[in-house]
């Protein structure tokens, strides 16, 4: 080591380097060997990496873990003493409709005079990434000064190659990788201090330490970029124990356990999954969108990739599948700066790997701007199609070639041959120029039909026909003809099929569907008029007039009783079977025969008052009659003295006799066509002879025999007596 003493005198002092100590990095990374400030001796140090994912969960530069749901823009990292002029901000917003949890919406990076924002426009679902500079969208890849910005499809990557700074933001949340060589012992903010000491990670502005980094985070709102309306705590925090973390997922179908499964087992010795599992469990219990759990697995897989452990973990879950364009393939570990045809082989490629959508094996990007994968380098034509060197093609009616010397496409207007001449024949055809179907860039002359140049033609068709216009094949102007309609024609009047056509007397004519082969019209078919038949009770009478049919003359009355029809002649009476009390008579009223109905009302009839076997139907066939018990033929008892001549019985003798009514009637008989008489009289039906002694005046006793009536009844007799004379007489007894 040299030391300046005085008077330009330099003293050389031997300098012995201390031995390199073996250290353990608190963040789990491997130590790196650096030179001291004199660039003479080496020492061990730990590079710093801060991660954030989910809603969100942080792992500081020195490996401390905490979750913070602030809804504001905060200082993620800033230098305590400005040396490299790098400041990083994080913009957190509420991202769940049911829980008060937040997600990183953007990372804002201020370096030297540039301010670049890495933004995700879709916090739930597929990422929509965009890089902005001073509010203007950048065309990626972007490179200016010491800054480069790339897009892997799933993540945006910000690099400062000179300082070996790498910042990613996208589907995996965010990560900030800083070398200890440039930033050691000189950081503060949400990512903590970069000094391999977790004890001072939760440091407030001004240097005060608190136990909880989640409490510390409230005190780091951004003040210089997009000043938010955030409330800064006015009092310093007091010590309070944090609630114990949840150790198991709250959802039965959670994918958090995959972090500790055989899927990630290869990475466990290099990167501990505990903090990522803890963040995944928190998301499972506090965020309704299950896809947020994917961020813990994605961030852990990205950390493994930086350690050289590439894991195809997305194949083991349906929730966290990748979504790449059809011309690209997903790779869990691909180069952050994809190879292109424009690569400068003098520039060393970036060693940073990331998951994303890459060109298939054997292909590379034509350039970073196009995003098109090619298997051979050449040019990109104006339509974005890759072309090989010296390839000739046609574009927009120009002859183009991919120039190898300039790696660009040059085009010249296409030269077309002179079109052949054509003469048009036939009415309506006009010679015009149009695009050649076989070569759209050139034109040809063709005969084109212009119907407005056709000659005028007028055509009137006869009744029943219609004009039809048609263009013959290969022609232009229409030709005319008269086609028959689907009608009949009679006396210059059209009739539709099925309509009646007035024709000869006593004929019925109709327009049919049969086609007349000569005229093409429908035929009119006729048949003799069918006279209608007469109804029941009428007779058909032929007339002698000019009419086609005779007429129906009424001869009988027609009676309809319960669906049964009966003809009744004029002047006759008819009763339905079993209903003799109903009478229907046919009478003439003017020229019409009319039916008159009547009903016989019978006198009251009580069968219990009738004498046995005397009930019968009256002469009208409707009412019932009988001999009443009080008036019926019966045996009447009488006591009297029998006197014969001058002799008489001493005592009264029982002398019964017959008295009462019997059925007698007179009615008309249709069968005999005369009056029918029926007569009966009340007389003895059983009697006996008895003898009694009579005492005479001369003292003699004379025996006398008389008839003693024992039973009476009605007996038939001839009706020979005149009307008005009594057919019965009370029998009297006198002595002769």
Image (cartoon, grey):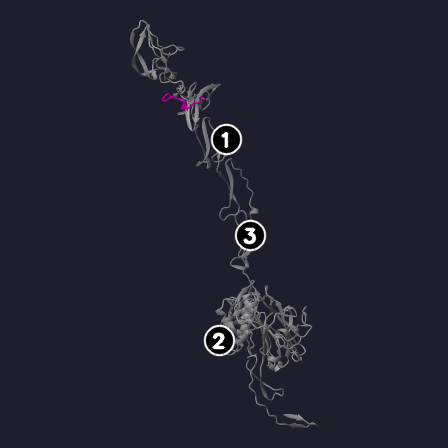
Left or right for 81, reference 284: right
- Looking at this view, name the residue that lies furthest to the top: 698
Q: Which quarter of the rendering shows the C terminus?
A: top left
Disc number for residue 491: 1
**Residue 579 at what x, y percent from top left?**
41, 24
Name the residue that disc number 2 marks: 265
**Residue 478 at what x, y percent from top left?**
52, 45
* Magenta extent: 601-615
Q: Residues within 10 Å of mark 2 (few under 14, many from 20)?
A: some
Give the alpha-carbon distance from disc 3 to disc 2, as whole Å.
Answer: 80 Å
Q: Quadrant of residue 658?
A: top left
Residue 441 shown in magenta: no
**Residue 654 at what x, y percent from top left?**
34, 14
**Residue at left offset 36%, top offset 13%:** 639
Q: Residues within 10 Å of mark 1 (few under 14, many from 20)?
A: few
Q: Secondary structure at mark 3?
A: strand
User: Relative to the observer, which residue lies in front, 292 or 492?
Assistant: 292
**Residue 414 at what x, y percent from top left?**
56, 63
Classify 31 as above or below 521. Answer: below
């Amino acid at each position: 080591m040299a030391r300046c003493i005085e008077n330009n005198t330099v003293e050389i002092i031997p300098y012995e380097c201390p031995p390199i100590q073996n250290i353990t990095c608190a963040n789990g990374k491997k130590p790196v060997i650096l030179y001291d400030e004199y660039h003479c001796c080496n020492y061990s140090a730990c590079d710093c990496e801060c991660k954030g994912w989910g809603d969100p969960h942080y792992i500081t530069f020195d490996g401390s873990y905490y979750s913070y749901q602030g809804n504001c823009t905060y200082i993620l990292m800033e230098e305590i003493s400005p040396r490299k002029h790098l400041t990083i901000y994080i913009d957190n917003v509420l991202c769940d409709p049911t829980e008060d949890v937040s997600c990183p919406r953007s990372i804002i990076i201020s370096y030297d005079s540039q301010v670049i924002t890495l933004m995700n426009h879709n916090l739930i679902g597929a990422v929509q990434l965009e890089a902005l500079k001073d509010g203007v969208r950048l065309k990626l890849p972007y490179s200016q000064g010491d800054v480069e910005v790339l897009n892997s499809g799933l993540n945006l990557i910000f690099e400062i190659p000179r300082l070996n700074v790498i910042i990613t933001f996208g589907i995996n949340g965010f990560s900030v990788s800083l070398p200890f060589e440039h930033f050691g012992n000189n950081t503060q903010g949400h990512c903590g201090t970069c000094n391999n000491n977790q004890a001072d990670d939760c440091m407030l502005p001004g240097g005060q330490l608190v136990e909880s980094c989640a409490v510390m985070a409230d005190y780091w709102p951004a003040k210089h970029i997009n000043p938010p309306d955030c409330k800064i705590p006015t009092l310093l925090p007091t010590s309070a124990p944090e609630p114990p973390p949840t150790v198991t997922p709250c959802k039965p179908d959670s994918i958090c356990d995959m972090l500790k499964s055989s899927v990630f087992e290869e990475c466990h010795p290099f990167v501990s999954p505990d903090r990522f599992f803890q963040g995944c469990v928190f998301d499972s219990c506090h965020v309704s969108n299950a896809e947020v759990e994917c961020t813990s697995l994605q961030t852990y897989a990205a950390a493994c990739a930086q350690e050289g452990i590439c894991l195809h973990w997305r194949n083991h879950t349906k929730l966290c599948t990748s979504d790449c364009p059809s011309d690209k393939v997903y790779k869990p570990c691909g180069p952050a700066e994809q190879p292109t045809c424009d690569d400068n082989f003098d520039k060393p490629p970036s060693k940073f790997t990331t998951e994303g959508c890459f060109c298939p094996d054997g292909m590379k990007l034509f350039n970073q701007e196009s995003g098109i994968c090619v298997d051979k380098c050449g040019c990109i034509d104006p339509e974005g199609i890759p072309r090989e060197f010296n390839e000739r093609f046609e574009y927009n009616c120009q002859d183009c070639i991919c120039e190898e010397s300039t790696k660009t496409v040059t085009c010249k207007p296409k030269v077309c041959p002179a079109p052949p001449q054509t003469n048009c024949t036939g009415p309506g055809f006009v010679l015009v120029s149009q695009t050649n179907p076989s070569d759209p860039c050139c034109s040809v002359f063709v005969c084109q039909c212009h119907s407005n140049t056709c000659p005028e033609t007028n055509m009137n068709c006869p009744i029943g026909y219609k004009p039809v216009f048609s263009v013959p094949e290969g022609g232009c102007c229409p030709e005319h003809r008269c086609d028959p309609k689907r009608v009949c024609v009679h006396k210059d009047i059209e009739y539709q099929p099925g309509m009646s056509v007035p024709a000869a007397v006593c004929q019925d004519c109709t327009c049919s569907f049969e086609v007349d082969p000569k005229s093409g019209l429908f035929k009119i078919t006729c048949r003799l008029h069918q006279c209608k038949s007469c109804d029941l009770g009428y007779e058909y009478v032929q007339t002698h007039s000019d009419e086609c049919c005779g007429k129906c003359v009424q001869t009988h009355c027609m009676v309809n009783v319960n669906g049964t029809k009966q003809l009744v002649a004029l002047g006759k009476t008819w009763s339905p079977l079993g209903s003799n009390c109903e009478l229907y008579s046919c009478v003439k009223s003017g020229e019409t025969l009319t039916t008159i109905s009547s009903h016989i009302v019978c006198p009251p009839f009580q069968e219990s008052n009738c004498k046995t076997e005397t009930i019968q139907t009256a002469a009208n066939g409707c009412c019932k009659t009988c001999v009443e018990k009080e008036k019926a033929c019966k045996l009447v008892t009488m006591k009297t003295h029998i006197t014969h001549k001058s002799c008489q019985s001493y005592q009264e003798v029982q002398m019964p006799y017959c008295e009462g009514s019997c059925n007698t009637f007179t009615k008309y008989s249709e069968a005999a066509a005369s009056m029918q008489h029926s007569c009966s009289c009340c007389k003895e039906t059983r009697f006996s002879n008895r003898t009694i002694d009579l005492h005479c005046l001369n003292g003699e006793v004379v025996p006398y025999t008389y008839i003693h009536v024992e039973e009476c009844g009605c007996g038939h007799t001839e009706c020979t007596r005149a009307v008005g004379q009594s057919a019965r007489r009370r029998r009297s007894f006198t002595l002769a």
